[in-house]
Structures are given as C-alpha cells and as structure tokens.
Image (tube, coloured by chain):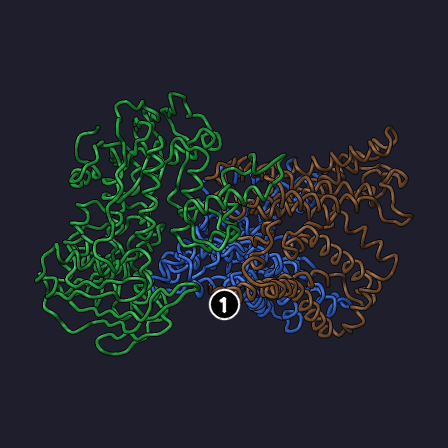
Amino acid sequence: MTAIELPPVVELAGITKAYPGVVANDSVNLLLHGGEVHVVLGENGAGKSTLIGVLSGMVTPDSGRILVDGEPVQIRSPKDALDLGIGTVYQHSLLVPTLSVIDNMMLGTAKLFSLDREQARRRLDELASVLGVQIDPEATVGDLALGERQQVEIVKALWRGERALILDEPTSMLTPQGVQALSEVVRRLVGNGLSVVFITHKLNEALDLGDRITVLRRGRNAGELAPDKIASTERGDLKDLVVELIFGAVDPDMSMNQGEGGSLDQQSVCFRLEEVSLHGDKPWPVLDSVSLEIRRGEIFGIAGIDGNGQKELAEVIAGQRKLDSGEIFLDEESVTGLSVAARQKRGIRYVTDDRHGEGTVGELSISLNTVLKRVGQRPFWRRARVRHSLIREFAATLVAEHDVRTPHEEVPIANLSGGNVQKVVVGRELAMEPRVVVYNKPTYGLDVKTIKAVLARIVSQANQGTVALLISTELDELISTCDRIGVMYQGRITGILDSQPGIETRLGELMTGGGEPA
Amino acid sequence: MSDLFSTLFLASLVSGGVLVAVPLVFAGVGEAISERAGVLNVGLEGMMLMGAFGAFAAAISVDSIWLGLLVGGLVGTATSLLMVGLCIRLNANQIVIGIAITLGAEGVTALLHSANYSDTYPRLPKAGVLDIPLLSKIPVLGEGLFSHHPSAYLAVLAVVAAWWVFKSTGIGLNIKAAGDQPHALAAAGGNPRSTRTMAVMTTGFLAGVGGAHIALIGAGLFVPAVTHGAGFIAIVLAMLARGRFGWIVTGAILIGISLSLTTAFQLVGVDVPIDAVQMLPFIMILVVLSAFGRDSYLPAALAVPYDPESR
Amino acid sequence: MTDVATPLGDEGFGSVDEHSKGLSQHAKGRMNSVLMAVLPVFAAVACGGILLALLGRDPVSFYSNVVDHGLLGSLGRQESLIRMAPLLLIAAGLMVAFPAGIWNLGTDGQFVVAGVVVAALGPELAPNVNGLVLFTVLFVVGFAVGAAWAVIPAVMKAWFGMNEIITTLMTIFLGVSFSSLLVKEFFDDPSTTVPQTKVLAVEDRLPRMFGSRVHIGLVVGLVAVLIVHYMMTRTAFGLRLRIVGMNPAAAEHAGMNMRSLTLSIFLLSSGFAGLAAAVEIAGVDGMVRAEWNPAFGFAVVPLVFLARFHGPSVVLFVAAFSSFSIGGESASRKADLPNYFVLVMVALMLIFLAISEFLQARSKNVVKDE
C-alpha cells in the first residue's frame, strides 16, 4: 500500500519555537515525500499544531531551516507557504463564512482589480472531480454542513498546494463513515503524487492511514516509523511501538473507568425531558421532540456530529436558551420556566465546551471565576458587598481538590493552560451539591492525563448519585464511560443504545440519520 | 398653503437637499468601506473638518475649487493615518481614538483658522454650477438635481466605483474578508492589516473631500465646527445602509431634504419652528432603525483589533 | 466591540506582582505604572507647546498664564471648582456605562433636555417650597429626565441588540433641537428679548460653601464619583457590570439577566448626565437659552478613559481639565487665540495614552516568562 519513495519534497530541520513559559517545538525534524501520507502523531500539547504552523506560514520559528526540493527557503507568512505550493486545511475553519465558495477560493489569489470568476469556476470543478465530490460554487460557506465545508477547505488548500497538503486533525468532526470517505480522498491525492501530512492524536487513525509516522512528544521528535517498517510489522506490535513513543512507556494505564451504574432498575428516574422542541432558521428543527429519561447516578452519553443540536440541547437544559415546546422535569418538578440562576440553585449545572469563551472571563482571577455563577449570592456576597476572603478560601479548596496547577488563585485565569482551565470549570460546576450536570465535550483539546482526570471525576460524581449528560464526539470515550448513549441527528434522537464495546458502527449509522428512532 | 407646493419651494428644497447630501454621500461611502473592513471610524467628523480647513486654505490661496477639493481629500487621508497608526498597528481602542481625532481636529482647525484668517474672515465666491443639458431643464426637479457644481456628480461616481470594487475586484474580496474573518484572509495569503490600512486611508480621502465640499461649495467659508455633525450623520448612514451603497445615497438625500426644509420654509414664508423641522431626519432614522435595524448586518470583526497570535 | 481596557482590576487583592515576585519588583512595577500614566500628560504638554510655537505664540507664557489663572488665582480656582461639578456627575455616569461596554455617547443630549426641564420647573417651584425640598425635587427631576431621554436607545440595545453608538449619537441631535424647541415654544420667558426660561433667582440657587462662590454641587459630584467607584469595585452589581463588559457571553452563561442589566446601566448612566444638568442650572446658570449646549459630555469621555475608570483618578483628571479649561480661557484671550486649545490637549493625551498602553503591554509580554 505504500507508494514509491521519492526524494523529500519538503524538509523541516531543527525547528525550534518557544512561547512564554513553554517550548512548543524543540529542534524538530520532519521530512515530507511526494506520493506518501505522512502522519504526525502525538497527544494534545505535544507540539503538532505549532509545527504545522511553521509549515503553513502562520508561525515563525525561532531557529531551524526549511528546504523545499532541496533548496533552503523562508516561510514568513501564509503567502510564502502558498507560493511554495504548501496548502493547509486548518482544524478550525479558516474560510470566510459570509462569502460564497467561489469567493473564498479567489481570496488571496485574485488580481487586485479584476475577478475572473469563469476561470475560478473551471478550476473548482477540476479539483472537485479530483476529490470525487460535488461542490456548488455559489453556496455561502456559512450555510454548508460540516462535511461539505471540509471538502471546500481541502479544495481551497489544493488551489495553490501542488506540492504538499496539510490536514490538521481533520477527523475530529466526522463519523466513522465520514473518516472512511476522507481517507479515500487522501489516497486518491497521494496516488497523484501529492505529499499529504496528516496531524492527529488518534492512534488508530494513524495506523490506518499513515504510510510514514512521526511521533512528537513534549515538543521533540520521539521517533519515526518508516514505510517499510510499517509494512512489515504486525498491527499489534506496531501499536505497542507507537504507544511507547507517544507516552515514553509501554502500555500506560489507558483503561477508562467504568461507571458503576449498578442497580439501575431500582434507581428512580431523576431527570426527564419531554418532547423538547426548538425551531431556528435551519430547514430542520434545531431540537425535534427530544425525550429522555435519565436515572440517578446514570451517565447518559449524547453522540453525534457537531452541529446537530447538541449544544442547543445543553443550553436549553441549562436555561440559556428558551425552548419552543416541551417540558423538563427534575425529580418530577418542572424546571422549564426557571431562569439560569434558579436552575443552578436547583442543582442543574452546565460544563460548557467553550472554556475560554463563555466559560471563563480571562482577565479575572481564578478566584472570581470559581464564583462566576454566584455573583451576589451568600456567603460570597453579603448585603451586596463582596467578601474576598471567603471567595479566596473557596477557590483554594477547589484548586487543591481538582489538582489545578497554578502559583495561587489570584492569577488571571487566562494564564492557565487549557487543561487547568477545564479543571477549574468542572470544579466550579461540581461544587455545592450538583444534581444534574451537562458536560459538553469536556475533554476536547486536553492531554491524556487531564482527560483521564476529567472522566474519572465525571464517573465518581455519578457514583455519588448525580445525573450526568455527557455530550461528546469521541466515541471511544462515550463507550467506555457511559451507561447508555443517545445519538442526535438533525435535532432528534435517532437511537439510544446501551453502551458496550463494538457499537461504533451502529452509532456511526445513527449519527448520519440511518436506523429507526428510539 | 399652495405656496408649499410652489415651484420655488420644491426647487429650493431639492437643490438644498442635494447640496447637503453630497458631503454625506462622500463621507458615508467612506465610512461604509472602513466598516466593511472591520474598522469603526468614529473620527469621521474630525477627518471631514480637517479636510474642510485644508480645502479652504488651499482654495483661498490658489483660487481653485478643484485644487481645494483635492487638498481636502489629501488632508483627510493624512488625518486617517492617526487611525491607521494607533488602531490598526498598535491595536488601540477604535472608539476612543476616533473621539480623540474628532476633538483634536475641532481644536486644531479652529486654532489654525483664527491664527490665519481671524482678521480678514475671507469668504469664497459662490461655486460655479454645471447645468446638465436637457435634464436640468425639467421643471422643479431639473434645477434641483442636475444643476450643481460638478463635484456633486463625482459623489455619484464614488458610489458607483465603490459598488464596483466590492462586486468585481480582489480588493473588494479582501476587504470583506478583513471585516468578517481576518484570520481567514491571513491564511489565504492576504494581509488584514494592509487591507484595513488601505480602507481607512480611502475613508480619510473621501471624508476630506466631503468636508471640503461643505466648506467650498456648501458654506463658502470656514468657521469652527463648520461640518456641524455631518460626520456623525454619515456614520449612522453607513451603519443603517449595511454596506449597500444605494441606500447611502437615498438616506443622504432624504436627510438633506429634511435639513433643507427650514431654508425652504423660510423662502416661502411659512412659519414652522426650525427645531421641530430639524428633529425630523433624526426621528426618521430612529424609526427606520427600529423597523429594520433588527437584522442589522455588521461585519463580525467590526472594531475588533486584528491580533495575528490569537486564534 | 467591548475591548475596553479593564483597569479597575480586582480591588482588595493587590496586583499579581506583589505575591509572586519580591518587594523590589513590586515597587518597580508600581513606579512603572505611575510613569505610564503620567507620561501621556507630559508628552501632550510638550506637543501642545510645539503647536503654540508654530502658531507664533510663546508656549511658556501661555502655560504659565494657564496655571496662573486656573490654579493660582483665587477667582480662577473657584471657577475651576465650579466647573468640576457637572463634569464629575457626567463622569460618574460614564464610569458606570463604559466598563460594561455600553457606549453612551449621548450624554450631551441627555444633559440639555434635563437642563431645560429643570430650568423651567425651578422658578415655578421656588416660591412655594424651601431650599432642601426644591433641590431634591430638581435633582430627582433632572435625573429622571436624563434617564428618560435614553430609554429608546436603551430598549433598542437591550431587546434588539441595536448598536448604541448610532442611537445615542442621534439622541444628541434630537436633544439639542428638542430642548431648543421647548425653550422657544413652551418655556419662554415673555419678559426677555432673547428666548430663554424664567430665571431662578440667585437666592434660590444652590448654597455656596465657605464664603466662596463654589456651590455644593461640587460635593454632590465628588460623592457621586466615589459612590460609583465603590459600587464598581465592591458590589455584586459592579462586578456583573464589568463581566458584561469583559465577556458578554460569559455573563449570559453565568445566568445574568442581560436585558435588565443593560437597561439599568444605560438609565443610570444617563440619569447622572441629567443630574449634572440640574446641578449646573440650580447652581450656576439659573436659566437656559435656546441653542444651549455646553458639550460637557464629549469632553468628559476622554477624561474617563485617561483615568481608566478609577474613581480618585477621575476626580484628578476632571480637576486638571477644569483648571486647564478655565486657565486656558484666560490664556487664550491673552494670546489672542480662540479657546480651543483644551480640546487639542485632550486629544493629544488620548493619543499618547494609546501609545503608552501599547508599550506597556509589549513590555509585559517580554517579561512574562516563568
């Protein structure tokens, strides 16, 4: 399956980049060959994004060399990278949502005083057929579904990228079937001689797709697996090899904690959604008669491709968004009409996925962030005046209990790493007797250690009787942590499965609308 | 009451309306370009004032209105460099700097005027008028619409040019991207900072020309604050029009007509409180805002400084 | 559009530097920020001096005239203190709105409309009630009218997210015209040739202090600024307000009632502007003429920024501005210049403030390694 090995098309040598407090890349080397899928593998925080930033021109390295076709070059901006034929598909969409597909294509390459739409359209058709997809040039990018949007991003990257195509964590939003489709596209491109770089933190993906694998750990090269090595080694041994490179140890404790669930039949229903519906401006309802019954101590997972109503479901439960019809019951008491603050008092908590956006206020201290949802409430405020010492104490306890790494609690929370911010957010929501907690993609972008800690926390909280609703795009996490998993597609629950190993394919089907509703 | 609809009244209304509208169109188009690129230019009034004074000084010394208009535009561009340097390069708060520019311009132009012209208080001769053949002979509307100094028609040209730039050029695409998703523009190989710089400098030029028009053709002289809030009205027009240039022209003419109602009334001897009449355009704007403002489309990155490191 | 500098910090905690670094570092940091705050002023003064020289005037004598009249001369000093009263009240209102990211640029409109109503009401009420009642009523009316004049922009923002810059700017034009209309058509004193309201007799105006000409409005202003400062730094409402300004999404997520918050901030802010007018009328003018617009609001906006919304600093900057205005009026007359120099100085200070903030932020980044 490996392609013929051609001389390196692009070479990164000794790339070093440091930010205040952390060395993101430390003398990293990378060789890209034409006609080959080169996977860059490492856990979150290993330095993959920074390396890719250097290649794509978004980041300027402190030192190191870049060679293209053997000649040293300077990549100081995305323009330089594109001029060299290096195209990038970024993890977070970098298309202009208000412009059409064709306008986005012409962005950056169009002549200043004229626009040749005809020529652009021809090229779009050409590239679309290379990928084997259909793309409407006049569609507004913001209206496209995620899968289509990614296709457009790939075409955009290929527009100038004749030498190399970089894909930064492209499968984070795809179903298993979607991943399959993507890999077919990648194989087709590689067959044409293109060099494809595939960034991921998922082990199985790397092994499935990679002709060559480079592993990064803590900003350094941890090791490389050449094509002949991959071809000649057993999958199981290969996996062990790679795991050792990623973590520096053989078989770290990757086993996820299993929830106790236990005597579910005896546990009475605690949290109930009844025909919750919400309409928006999409052609399908944002939430379509969603009905759920979750028992005390149960961890109920919500699987689905991003953008199928999961975030809105979380917001409706939290009270941030008003539903159009339906009811929400906590212990048979209707909470449908209650405000966010009232629901919090009742014990309904929401760990948002947007930890740096709505989840925290960066300029404020960790302390104040821990009481962000309790401004004005006793005991932290008395007669509307703030009591700093009590807030400080509360924060200190939280920081200690959740292992948040920080010099002290008065540091602005923006100074913390993503993992530590997430610990604060989770800690905040779990404080003061939670009864129902909605977790929205709580492990996104975190390193393995923190992921384990967060999932362990979710499980232990559930074992104490809290109801947990875990929204995630990571199927393996859902399967190993949850008792049951509901799948959302276009605002409705397309199925509810008991969680057990092996249901990935079925989940994938339900995530794209296949299968009978629950 | 029949006087109200007399030719004299209507003609003077339309003519006066256009006269007021022309600088509003120049400045409004300029502001729309800036806003589309993501820059909120509150200093528009200041740029118009500086343009007005520069134009006045030039026209007085060289006795040429066209040169005056050009100088006004250039002075406006120079003033906009403050915005470029502080807000686009140094990421300062656009609203605060805009206010600083407006206050500073008011002060500087007043001082310069007093230092140079306070003894003589020169006035400019009334600007020449270009009658468009045939069209200007239409009763009532003809004289009002087609009998103006050629710079009025330039305003129309500016609108058409701006519309064309946004529809059919790479620059237009870059500006739209800079206003909606500057990081996308950077990833595509563009430069949000230079794009915004160019947009703001163009705004400065157009604002300067607008101010120049007020001083040279509208008023025929310069006094402190001669622009009388035109810059702020232009900001409102640009936001209301949401980047659709045709609406800027319509709005400008409507406001122009409302504002020239007072002179028109006086001309036919109707006794209506000036203040009530002067409130009309703003009440109208508020009504339009409440009716249509809800779907207000403002560029997502408006007034947010572009920071390459943040993503 | 809420990237307002967040200079208030969290009072009561002290700066981070204090805890993590040694004492000498702390002292250095403090000195640094004082320097950064004062630098714009010096730079502006220097630039202003150059401008004066270019205009053919002697900067040294100009500035010394400013100080002589504004600060040293007893009469000028009193005038400066009197001028501070309305400015402080408007500043108090802006200290509420701006940190919340609400750009209430319409204080000039709120000011004049409230002023006209108070001016019309005063002389009617004065003969029938004693001083304390009169002033209370006038203050309350002033505050209420000021707040009322901002209801439309406030509702438009709170309910429809309508940009308040446009709406409040419009209310200035509307306010100036409306107040003029009121004076000419409804409140006109028939006994005067020029359209104006009836005069509030001098003996009915706000009492003076310590035998000087300075009326108690100054105290009202000082108290207002300090109360607002306390509110912003120590109360739950103040924190909510600042969170809305720093991160509106987080405010919603945290369950804050955005509509009622926006409304109350807006009305509070414009109420203060109305109160400022009441103080000015009841304390100084006693009446309002048509076309009256001292444009205090627009002058206060930059001052509040320069003071970074910090109460005591606001008082200092307003005091400096007032004495410079009063002194500048006299100095300008002597130098045969119109009295616009203050505006130029304020603009220069803002520009240098932006530059110094940039330099400060950049130096912080360099030092930031741990």
- Counting from the top left corner in percent of width and height, residue C243 is at 53, 45
With C365 as the anchor, is C137 left or right in this view? right
Q: Position of residue C150 (x, y in %)?
A: 63, 39
- Rendered hue of chain A is green
- A49 or A55, which is in the foreground? A49
Which residue sits furthest bottom?
A71
Three-letter residue code for mark 1: Val
Q: Which residue is located at x 53 percent, y 63 percent?
A: C361
The kind of secondary structure element at disc 1 is helix
Give residue B168's quadrant in the image.
bottom left
Residue A376 visible somewhere in the drawing: yes
Q: Quadrant of residue C111?
A: top right
Q: Position of residue A468 (x, y in %)?
A: 34, 34
Q: Colour of chain C?
A: brown
Examine the rendering and report whether any part of residue A119 can be seen. no
Residue beneath the point at 22% across and 51% down: A135
* Circle 1 chain: C
Residue at (25%, 52%) from the top-left corner?
Answer: A150
How packed mark 1 is, by other alpha carbons closer than 10 Å (few <14, some 14-19, many 20 or more), is few
Q: Is residue A226 above or below residue C10?
A: below
Front residue of A498 and B132: A498
* Foreground of the two, A265 or C254: A265
Q: Quadrant of residue B161?
A: bottom left
Where does residue A77 sit, x and y in percent of width and height? 36, 68
Q: Which residue is mark 1?
A: C366
Residue placed most toward the observer, A461 or C311:
A461
Q: Which quadrant holds the C terminus of chain B?
A: bottom left
